[in-house]
Image (spheres, helix red, strand yellow):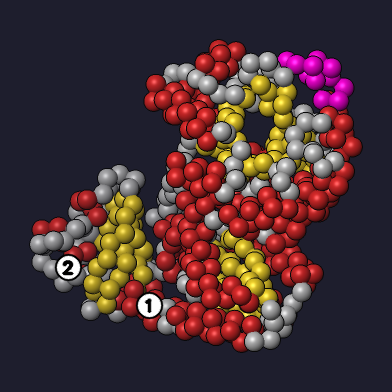
Amino acid sequence: MKKELFYLINLKPYIVIDKDFNIVDYNENLKRELNLKNINGKCYEVLFKKERPCFLEKDEECPLVSLNENESDIFLKEINFQRYIFETYKKNDIIVSLLTNVEKLISKFEKNKLKNLEKFLKEISNQFEKYKSIFISFTSIINFEDISKEFGLEVALLVSQKLEKTLINFLGKNKVKVFPISDSDFLILYLNGYDEKDILNLERQAIKLLLNFENDLLNKKLTASTFLLTTKIKQENYKDISSIIESLLYLKQEFILSLEKKASSLIDIAKIEEKLTKKKEKINILKRAIEEQAVEVYFQPIVDLETRQIHHLEALMRIIINDKVYSAGYFINELLENNFIDLDILVLKRLRSLYDKLLGLNLPIFINVSYKSLASYNYRRELKETLEFFKKKNPKFGFHLEITEQVMFNSYKILEAIKDDFPNVKIAIDDFGIGYSSLGLVAKLVEKDLCSYIKIDGSVVKDSIYSKPLTSVIETICTLAEKFKLETIAEYIENEELENYIKKLGVKYGQGYLYSPPRPIDDFLKSKEIMEGL
């Protein structure tokens, strides 16, 4: 059993109980924590001083009885007037429980969090007495709850402490203050009137710091996902600082919901080890791509379903290492979970280097704007430079942004600023039809002139031909689009049968391997067949 629990057992008290309620394994931490000399016997006798199993008592629950095979759950129990969290996992009719003393955790980690927020607000007030605008950042351990569930709350809090120390050690040297406001959230205040150039440099360093932090934990068999948002606050908006903080926390929650939830197990070591090894390999490839600037942009056509004429191109990132081409999809979890903002910045720079070819094609370009990148001050600066660059070359050139719905919820001001400066930019809601789709969201975006396209998620499109409910979803989206004067794009069209079916439902444009896989820009310039219609 100790081998199966690998490194977890040394981190906190644990106990193993068989189907007959006998204690069959434990560690010394358990004896010390519970101050027990003898741990031989039934669990209900040793731990809770009961004469019969807990589930026979009123309002009591026993994981041996309530859990099915391979299930896990958390139980709150009291031992010697101390509350303990029992994180349990059932396998082969035995229960493995990791114990966390709630009283100690509360006193150890939560005492100063409210005071920190008060200090943060007071420090902002002091800064505004000297400066007309200031910069703040918000960073968070996005998967804090997942770490807690998989490795125990105490481990998650130790990870939080490690990040806090990391941030303070780095930022404290640069006249920057860090304020922990929860177990997983930190507010960062840049002091003494840093200008934009300073902030860009500091944020770049902070992003690398977070990436290294994530990598260090990965080497310790812990996967952590951090998030960094940097923004400027003007003095006249200071009265709204509380709502800004609320927005930052809400933004974090939206991002958590956007991540794919994965089932985890404390017991299946082989799968965990395989997953961690694969993740390390991918992260090393991405780090090398940044170092060598081994990023290329491929393009996939978006065609008119009636004429099959190409009307747009979507720009898609490719990593090329040792002549091997990797799609962004291969690294989707790493790009979502880790801080590879520099890759998206390299895509923008590469697009600028291709401007003469793109202007020659004279086709509007869609680019994906990721959640984490939009939060980065460096990325927003690079995006603005790219839009200004193309506007100067050709004021009418079409540059469109694809943004997932959860980004839309909290990015109105950023998107409004982009639209004000670059009226020709159009915005598409990507992956529509799954996740956070709502009529209210679309209505708000249309009202603010922040939406021109709806891209229907490929999983909805490809299965619609076999599903009446999904067909109804697409028909509803098309009706909505017509009402709001929006264009619809169906992803993942891979055969003519699906193309004809989607076309009949009222979709305007299509994208998929039926027309073309993503290709280098030179393929579009050389191929008359593609450019003259498919």
510 or 87: which is nearer to us?
Answer: 510
In the displayed structure image, the side of residue 193 where residue 119 appears, left or right: left
Q: Is residue 356 above or below residue 51?
A: above
Q: Which of pointers 2 and 1 lies earlier in the amino acid sequence?
A: 2
Q: Is residue 205 above or below residue 379?
A: below
Quarter of the image with the N terminus in it: bottom left
At x 68%, y 50%, the residue is 419
Quarter of the image with the C terminus in it: top right
Q: Amino acid at mark 1?
A: Ile
Q: Is residue 172 visible?
A: no
Outermost residue on the right side: it is 356
Badge 1 crowding class, 10 Å Cα cut-off, few under 14, some 14 to 19, many 20 or more, is few
Residue range highlighted in magenta: 524-534
Q: Is residue 175 above or below residue 329?
A: below
Q: Is residue 531 magenta?
A: yes
> Could you tell me how far apart the alpha carbons at marks 2 and 1 are, in whole angstroms?
28 Å
Element type at mark 2 = helix
417 or 98: which is nearer to us?
Answer: 417
At x 44%, y 23%, the residue is 471
Q: Position of residue 394 (x, y in %)?
A: 85, 41
Q: Position of residue 92 (x, y in %)?
A: 31, 46
Element type at mark 1 = helix
* Residue at mark 1: 106
Could you tell me if the residues under marks 2 and 1 are in contact, i.e. CB atoms within 8 Å?
no
Q: Amino acid at mark 2?
A: Glu
318 or 148: which is nearer to us?
Answer: 318
At x 54%, y 46%, the residue is 447
Count of labels shown? Answer: 2
* Residue at mark 2: 45
At x 22%, y 64%, the residue is 43
